[in-house]
Amino acid sequence: MSQTYFKQWVEEKKAKGSYALPPRIDGRNDAIIMVNDQPIINLSSNNYLGFANHPALKAKAIEAVQSHGVGAGAVRTIAGYNDLLETLETTIAQFKGEEAAIVFQSGFACNAGVIQAIALEGDVIFSDELNHASIIDGVRLSRSKKFVYKHNDFNHLESLLKEHRHLYRHALIISDGVFSMDGDVVNLPAMVSLAKTYDALTYIDDAHGSGVLGPYGKGTVAHYNLSGQVDFTIGTLSKALGVVGGYVACSQVMKDYLVVNARPLLFSTALPAAVLAPLNEAFHQLKSSQSLVDQLWENARYFQALCHEHQLTLLPTQTPITPILIKDEAKAVSISKACLKDGVYISAIQFPTVPLGTARLRVMISAAHTKEQLKKAAEIIAHHVHTIQ
Ligand SMILES: Cc1ncc(COP(=O)(O)O)c(C=O)c1O
């Protein structure tokens, strides 16, 4: 290993035109952000419901700093947990229709920690090929055998289960609920049915489904009316919920096991009060009204219709995630840069986040966007997609 190797790697990527860094944002993350003193329409945030800059959440964060201080002190299994965390876990369990929930420092830490803790030597994992990187890392950290099935292809999964399931002790089927780079949704009824037939546990990462799908944004499992039939539902507290953190909703038995076995809980400091208090407020808001979730979907349908009018090629999304297919990485980066100059921030997503040759501009719609902002953004994006070679 040498630094020269990495220097060369960066230089080669820059020469190809596909080296891209995000802009520095001055101040808050919202529908409009400030970049170099210019207001920019922000289409690159997962702030689905506008909670990241919500006045009620900010007030709770400030209050919590006064009452609880700024740091959690140590890891949860050593320093203990506070009332805010207890409330949050109870609220999440109720919201998800599960017996229990455990909060982690992030969705990434949750996937890495939970999969590693439950899938042991002698077990087998079946994982969708488009699952999130944190699932892939969790699977790598576990000592189980792994099989990857074709994206959302439950015939392929069944053939793998038929061939391999009987050779292992426990089996775990893992899928994203909503696929983050494509916006499509897992065929959960098919997955649950196979899990029953082949005696497997089920694991859904609903980072992009919570706050988006189902009544009151309860998520993919509620969307399919399958509450109580998925063993582990993972979520993040950083996207629709607007702050930071992750969680697993599961049975009380699994909570009892995981709180003393999931390594991020044992070896990494817990979330501070200034994070927990606004999250409790976010759930309160989400449970009290459907209106932000409805607004998000109205905005998404409006923007996706504009994309069709402008003859942009969308990948077959079923959610507010709107991926505009460009294919060529350098072209996607050039369009993203040109859009930013014209007042629209939309990031170019390229390998290894998505397969080579499928570079895309991924538009993330928020309830906080106005129709005028979305209309203007669609015009600017379409202009650059159709003119940049
Ligand atoms: C599907 C999925 N799972 C997990 C994560 C990680 O969540 P967090 O940002 O809370 O670490 C993300 C976020 O990028 C995601 O898209």
Image (tube, rainbow, N blue to C red):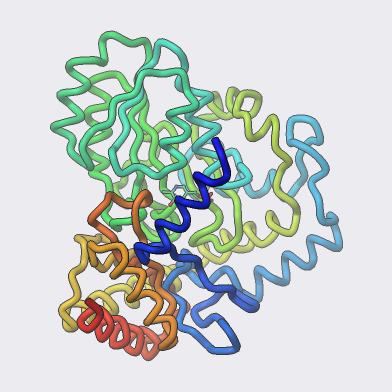
Q: Which residue is drawn at 52% across and 31% down?
A: 114
Is 66 rendered above or below residue 72?
below
Task: State left or right for residue 1 relative to residue 178.
Answer: right
Among the 4 quarters of the image, the one containing residue 316: bottom left
Q: In the rendered image of this protein, does residue 62 appear above or below residue 299?
A: above
Q: What x and y, as percent, mark residue 337?
A: 40, 77
Residue 254 appears at what percent x and percent y?
Answer: 53, 26
Quadrant in which residue 182 is drawn:
bottom left
Task: Please state, as top left, top right, bottom left or bottom right, where the C terminus lies in the image.
Answer: bottom left
The image quarter in which residue 124 lies: top left
- Compare residues 92 and 322 and report the one nearer the observer: 322
- Going 25% across and 35% down the picture, which residue do you hit? 191
Q: Where is residue 318 in the image (x, y as percent from the top left)?
A: 25, 60
Q: Position of residue 178 (x, y in %)?
A: 34, 51
Depth check: give the residue in front, 2 or 197. 2
Quick check: 4 above or below 58? above
Quadrant housing the N terminus: top right
Give the residue at x 79% y 66%: 63
Q: Which of 294 and 248 is in front in this view?
A: 248
